[in-house]
Image (cartoon, coloured by chain):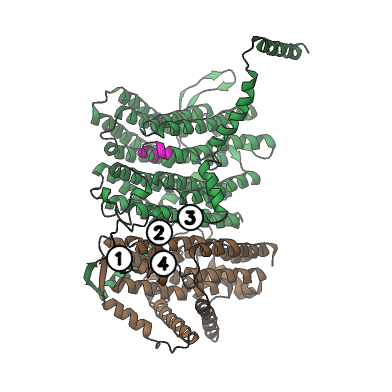
Chain colours: A green, B brown
C-alpha cells in the first residue's frame, strides 16, 4: 500500500475540521454530516493501514542545527491498532453527536473541534519524531480545552481552565523529558531511542515521560481534571476524550515508553504498579460516594486507568497484554456509559442521582447498554472487562506481587458497588413525577450505545479474536508460547464455552419457570409492611447507598478531606502556590529606589559571574 | 472448535446442576434439622425442602406494579447460572486436578459473587423500597467480606505458589493439607466467617433481616422465581464449604474410604456454620463492615505475613 495513506487520517480530519468551522451556523445538518462522512472515510483508511505491514512515510526533512525536525510517520502494529480504534470511536461519537447536538448552539465549532482532535490524535500516534508527537499531543489538549468550554453550564469555564492547567503541566514535563532524552541520545526519532534505565538521570527522564502519559490517561495523583471536566463539559465530549481517546493516547505512550523507549527495570516497574494500585483503590472509594452520575463515571474511569498502569507495570507479557486489552475494553464500555449519561441528561435535563430514577422502562436501550457496560466494567464474566482483568491478575501473580492482586480484585468489587448505585439511582427504583413523560432518545443516539455494548459482549465471548489479532502482535507474542495460559481452546474455561454454559443455565432456569405456572402471572400491589404508601413518598434514593461507609470512623475524615480537595494537586498548588506568590509580592513595594537597588545588585551579580 | 457433550453432561447432571441442587437441598435440611435440635424442636422430614420447592413452582408469579418485568424475572436466573457453573468448575477440578486452567481460582471467586449479584438486581428491579434497602445492604456486605476473603484465599495461593486450583489440591496431596500451617489456619478461619457472610446467614443476614425489612430483596418474590432463589441459596450452602475444603483441607476425594472422610469434612463445616447461625444475634450493617474491614482484615493480613515468612 502507498505510504502516503498515512497522511490521510491526520490531515483529512484537520482540513475538513477547518472547513466545517468556516461554515455558517445555520447550515445545520451539514456540519455533522460532513464530519460523519469523512470520519467514515478515515476509519476505512485506518483499517487499511492496520491490515498492511508497517508503513513509513517522510513528508519533509528539516534539520535545525543538530535538531532533526523531519516529519516522519510510521505505523508500528501498536500505533496502527490505536489509530484504528481512535477512528472507530470517533465515528460512533460523531454519529451520536448528530442527535445530541441538534438544537444546541455552535455546531460548527463542536464538529470542527472534534475533527481536529481526531486528526491530531492520529498524528500523535503515528509521528515518529518526538517533537511532532508533542505538537499533536498539544493540539489534542488545546482542542479539549475548547470543547469543554462548549459545555454551557457554570462549571464549564472552571473545568476547561483546570484541565488545561493540569494537562499543560504534564505536557511541560513531556517537553522537558524530550529535551533531556535528546541530550542523552542525540536523536528524536522514536524508533532509534532505547535507553536502559539504571541510573539517576534515566529514571528522572522516565518519570517526566510518565507524568505526560499518566496525566493524559488520568491516573492518580494527576487525575483531578477528569471529574471536574466530566461535570463541566458536554457529555459526549467526556465520552470522547477522557473516556476513550485520552486513554488510548496515554496508555499508548505508556506502552511505548515501557516497551520501546526504555528498557524497564524493577524500581520503575514497581513505581508503575504502586501508582496503578493506589489509583484503583482510591478512585474506586471516591466513586462510591459521588452524587452526580457523570462525576461517578469519571472516578470509575480513573480507577480503570489504575488497572492498565498496573498491567503494564507488571512487566510480564500477560500483564502487558492485559493492560493493553483493558485500554481497548475501557474505551468501549466507558464511552458507552458516558453516552448513556448524555442520553439521560438530554432527556431529563439532569445527572443528579437524587433527581433520577426508574428510567429502565422508559429508556430500554440506554438501560441495556449501560447495564452490559457496567457489568463488563466490574469484570463480571463473560464480558470483555473480565478477560482483561483476569489477564492483569495473572500478570501480578507471575511477577509475584500478590498484594496488588488483592487490591485489584477488591477494586473490582468497588466498581461493581459504584455501578450498582448508579444503575439503581437512574434506572431502577421509582420514577419521580417530573420524569413521567421521559422517552427513549433518538435513533442516531441509540445506535452507538448499543453497538458499543454489543462490542463488550463480543470481545468478552470471543476474547481470543482481539487478543490474537490486536494485542498479541503488539508485543510480538504468539499464543503457542504460553504454557497452559491463554490456550482458550483446550482449557475448560474458554470464554466461549463458559458463555454457552451460562446461557444453558439461563435456559434451565426458564424451563423451571415453565414447569411452574409462568402463565399464572399477575401484577400485584407492592408490599411495604402492609401499609398503602405512595411510592413517591417512600422512594429509596441510591445516593444513600453507601452512607454507612462514608460514616465509618476513619473514612469520615478522609472523605471530608477529599471533598475539600485535599488530594487534588491542582487545588493544592493553587492554595500553597498562592502563599509563595504572596512572599514575592512583598518585594514589589512600588518604591523606585528599591527596584533600582535590586537592579544594581543583579547587575553586580552578573558582572561577578562574567568577570570571574 | 470441537464440541462434545461431555461438558454439557458435567454441567447439567453431575457434578453440576442436578447433583448440587440435590445435595444443597439436603444440606438445607441438615440446617433446619440441627437448628431445630438447638431450639428443642423436632424439625422437618428430609424431603421438606424438595416439597417446598415443588410447591413454590406451582404457585402463581406476582410481579409488583410498575417494576421492570424482565429484570425482575431475570435476576434469579443469573444467580442460578453462576452457582451451577462455579459448582461444575470446582467439582471437575476436584475429581481431576489436571483439568484446571490458569487463573481458574479467579474465575471461581468471581462466579461465587453471581448469586449475590442476582439478589441485588432482583431487589432493585422489584422497586420495593425494602428491596432497595436490602440490595444496598447486600452490596455493602459484599464490599465488607470481599477484602478479608480475597486475602485469605491468596494466603493459600502464596503458600503453593500457583493460582491453579488443581495445583493447590495436588500440593496438599503430596505434602499434607494446608491446615497444618499456622498461616493457613488463620486464613481458613477468616474465610469460614466470610463464607457465613457470603451465605447471608445470621449474624450476617443483614440484607433480608426479617424484623426490619420483611424479606429485603425477596419481599416481592413469589412462585417460581422465589423457588430459584431458594434453590440457589441451597446450592451455595453446598458449594462454599466445598470450595474452602478444596483450598485448605485437602479437597474432596472419591477413592474408597476417602468418600467418607470427604463427607465428614463437609458436614463438619456445615454444622459449624449452622451452630454459628444459631448462637449469634444479627449485626447491624455498619458493625458488620467495621468487623470485616477491621479485625478480620487485620487477622487475614497477619495470616498472609505468616505465609510470607514461611509458616
Q: Chain of mark 1?
A: B
Residue of label 1: B73
Tell me the distance, in whole angstroms, between the alpha carbons under discs 4 and 1: 14 Å
How far across and down, in percent of the image, does residue B250 sit?
A: 58, 75
* Disc 2 element: loop
Q: Which mark is residue A382?
A: 2
* Disc 4 element: helix
Q: Is residue B256 above or below residue A374?
A: below
Binning the other alpha carbons within 10 Å of mark 1 as few (below 14), some (14 to 19) or many (20 upward) gives many
**Which is the main secondary structure of the residues drawn in magenta?**
helix
Residue at position x 26%, y 69% in the image: B62
Q: Is residue A536 above or below residue A577?
A: below
Tell me the distance, in whole angstroms, between the alpha carbons under discs 3 and 1: 26 Å
Does the segment drawn in magenta span residue A234? yes
Binning the other alpha carbons within 10 Å of mark 2 as few (below 14), some (14 to 19) or many (20 upward) gives many
* Residue numbers of the magenta segment: A229-238
Tell me the distance, in whole angstroms, between the alpha carbons under discs 2 and 1: 20 Å
Q: Chain of mark 4?
A: B
Q: Are marks 2 and 1 on the same chain?
A: no
Residue of label 3: A414
Q: Is residue A518 above or below residue A131?
A: below
| Quadrant assignment, res A554 | bottom right
Side of A166 relative to B64 (left or right) = right
Residue of label 4: B115
* Disc 1 element: helix
Amino acid at each position: 500500500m502507498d505510504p502516503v495513506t498515512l497522511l490521510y487520517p491526520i490531515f483529512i480530519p484537520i482540513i475538513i475540521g477547518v472547513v466545517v468551522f468556516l461554515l455558517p451556523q445555520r447550515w445545520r445538518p451539514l456540519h455533522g454530516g460532513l464530519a460523519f462522512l469523512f470520519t467514515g472515510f478515515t476509519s476505512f483508511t485506518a483499517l487499511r493501514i492496520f491490515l498492511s505491514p508497517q508503513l513509513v512515510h517522510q513528508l519533509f526533512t528539516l534539520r535545525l542545527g543538530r535538531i532533526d525536525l523531519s516529519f516522519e510517520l510510521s505505523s508500528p502494529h501498536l500505533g496502527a491498532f490505536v489509530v484504528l480504534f481512535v477512528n472507530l470511536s470517533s465515528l460512533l461519537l460523531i454519529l451520536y453527536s448528530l442527535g445530541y447536538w441538534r438544537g444546541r448552539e455552535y455546531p460548527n465549532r463542536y464538529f470542527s473541534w472534534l475533527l481536529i482532535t481526531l486528526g491530531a490524535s492520529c498524528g500523535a500516534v503515528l509521528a515518529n519524531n518526538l517533537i511532532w508527537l508533542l505538537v499533536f499531543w498539544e493540539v489534542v489538549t488545546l482542542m479539549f480545552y475548547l470543547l469543554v468550554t462548549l459545555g454551557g453550564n457554570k462549571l464549564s469555564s472552571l473545568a476547561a481552565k483546570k484541565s488545561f492547567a493540569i494537562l499543560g503541566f504534564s505536557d511541560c514535563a513531556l517537553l522537558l523529558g524530550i529535551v533531556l532524552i535528546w541530550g542523552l541520545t542525540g536523536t528524536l526519532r522514536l524508533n532509534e531511542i532505547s535507553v536502559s534505565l539504571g541510573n539517576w538521570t534515566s529514571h528522572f527522564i522516565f518519570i517526566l515521560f510518565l507524568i505526560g502519559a499518566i496525566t493524559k490517561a488520568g491516573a492518580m495523583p494527576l487525575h483531578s481534571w477528569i471529574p471536574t471536566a466530566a461535570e463541566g463539559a458536554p457529555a459526549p465530549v467526556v465520552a470522547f476524550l477522557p473516556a476513550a481517546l485520552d486513554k488510548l493516547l496515554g496508555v499508548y505512550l505508556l506502552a511505548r515508553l515501557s516497551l520501546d523507549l526504555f528498557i524497564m527495570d524493577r524500581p520503575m516497574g514497581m513505581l508503575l504498579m504502586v501508582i496503578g494500585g493506589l489509583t484503583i483503590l482510591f478512585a474506586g472509594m471516591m466513586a462510591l460516594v459521588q452524587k452526580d452520575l457523570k462525576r461517578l463515571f469519571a472516578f470509575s474511569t480513573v480507577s480503570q486507568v489504575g488497572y492498565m498502569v498496573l498491567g503494564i507495570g507488571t512487566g510480564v507479557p500477560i500483564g502487558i497484554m492485559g493492560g493493553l486489552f483493558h485500554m481497548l475494553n475501557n474505551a468501549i464500555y466507558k464511552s458507552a456509559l458516558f453516552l448513556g449519561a448524555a442520553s439521560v441528561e438530554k432527556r431529563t435535563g439532569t445527572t443528579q442521582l437524587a433527581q433520577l430514577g426508574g428510567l429502565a422502562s422508559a429508556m430500554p436501550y440506554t438501560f441495556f447498554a449501560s447495564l452490559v457496560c457496567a457489568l463488563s466494567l466490574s469484570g463480571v464474566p463473560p464480558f470483555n472487562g473480565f478477560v482483561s482483568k483476569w489477564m492483569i491478575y495473572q500478570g501480578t501473580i507471575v511477577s509475584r506481587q500478590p498484594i496488588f492482586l488483592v487490591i485489584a480484585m477488591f477494586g473490582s468489587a468497588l466498581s461493581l458497588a459504584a455501578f450498582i448505585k448508579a444503575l439503581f439511582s437512574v434506572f431502577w427504583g421509582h420514577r419521580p413525577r417530573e420524569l413521567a413523560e421521559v422517552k427513549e432518545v433518538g435513533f442516531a443516539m441509540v445506535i452507538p450505545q448499543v453497538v458499543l455494548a454489543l462490542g463488550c459482549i463480543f470481545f468478552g465471548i470471543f476474547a481470543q479474536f482481539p487478543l490474537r489479532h490486536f494485542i498479541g502482535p503488539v508485543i510480538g507474542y504468539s499464543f503457542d508460547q504460553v504454557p497452559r495460559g491463554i490456550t482458550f481452546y483446550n482449557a475448560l474455561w474458554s470464554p466461549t464455552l463458559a458463555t454457552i454454559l451460562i446461557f444453558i443455565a439461563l435456559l434451565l432456569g426458564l424451563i423451571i419457570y415453565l414447569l411452574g405456572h409462568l402463565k399464572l402471572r399477575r401484577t400485584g400491589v407492592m408490599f411495604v409492611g402492609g401499609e398503602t404508601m405512595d411510592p413517591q413518598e417512600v422512594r429509596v434514593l441510591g445516593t444513600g447507598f453507601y452512607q454507612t461507609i462514608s460514616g465509618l470512623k476513619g473514612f469520615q475524615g478522609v472523605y471530608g478531606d477529599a471533598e475539600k480537595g485535599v488530594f487534588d494537586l491542582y487545588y493544592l498548588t493553587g492554595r500553597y502556590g498562592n502563599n509563595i506568590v504572596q512572599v514575592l509580592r512583598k518585594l514589589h513595594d512600588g518604591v523606585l529606589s528599591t527596584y533600582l537597588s535590586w537592579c544594581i545588585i543583579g547587575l553586580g551579580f552578573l558582572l561577578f559571574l562574567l568577570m570571574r | 472448535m470441537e464440541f462434545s457433550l461431555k461438558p454439557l453432561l458435567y454441567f447439567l447432571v453431575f457434578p453440576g446442576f442436578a447433583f448440587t441442587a440435590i445435595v444443597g437441598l439436603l444440606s438445607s435440611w441438615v440446617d433446619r434439622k440441627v437448628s431445630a435440635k438447638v431450639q428443642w424442636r423436632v424439625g422437618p422430614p428430609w424431603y421438606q425442602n424438595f416439597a417446598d420447592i415443588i410447591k413454590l413452582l406451582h404457585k402463581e408469579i406476582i410481579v409488583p406494579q410498575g417494576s421492570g418485568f424482565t429484570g425482575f424475572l431475570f435476576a434469579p436466573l443469573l444467580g442460578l447460572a453462576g452457582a451451577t457453573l462455579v459448582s461444575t468448575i470446582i467439582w471437575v477440578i476436584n475429581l481431576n486436578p489436571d483439568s484446571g486452567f490458569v487463573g481458574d481460582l479467579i474465575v471461581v471467586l468471581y462466579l461465587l459473587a453471581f448469586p449475590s449479584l442476582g439478589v441485588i438486581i432482583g431487589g432493585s428491579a422489584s422497586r420495593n423500597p425494602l428491596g432497595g434497602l436490602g440490595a444496598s445492604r447486600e452490596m455493602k456486605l459484599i464490599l465488607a467480606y470481599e477484602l478479608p476473603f480475597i486475602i485469605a484465599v491468596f494466603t493459600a495461593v502464596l503458600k503453593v505458589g500457583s493460582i491453579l486450583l488443581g495445583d493447590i489440591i495436588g500440593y496438599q496431596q503430596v505434602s499434607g493439607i494446608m491446615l497444618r500451617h499456622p498461616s493457613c489456619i488463620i486464613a481458613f478461619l477468616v474465610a469460614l466467617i466470610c463464607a457465613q457472610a457470603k451465605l447471608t446467614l445470621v449474624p450476617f443476614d443483614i440484607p433480608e433481616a426479617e424484623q426490619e425489612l420483611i424479606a429485603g430483596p425477596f419481599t416481592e418474590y413469589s412462585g417460581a422465581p422465589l423457588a430459584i432463589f431458594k434453590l440457589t441459596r441451597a446450592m451455595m450452602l453446598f458449594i462454599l464449604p466445598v470450595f474452602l475444603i478444596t483450598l485448605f483441607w485437602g479437597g474432596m476425594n472419591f477413592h474408597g474410604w476417602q468418600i467418607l472422610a470427604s463427607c465428614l469434612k463437609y458436614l463438619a463445616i456445615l454444622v459449624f456454620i449452622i451452630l454459628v447461625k444459631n448462637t449469634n444475634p444479627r449485626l447491624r450493617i455498619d458493625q458488620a463492615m467495621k468487623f470485616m474491614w477491621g479485625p478480620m482484615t487485620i487477622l487475614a493480613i497477619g495470616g498472609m505475613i505468616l505465609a510470607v515468612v514461611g509458616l
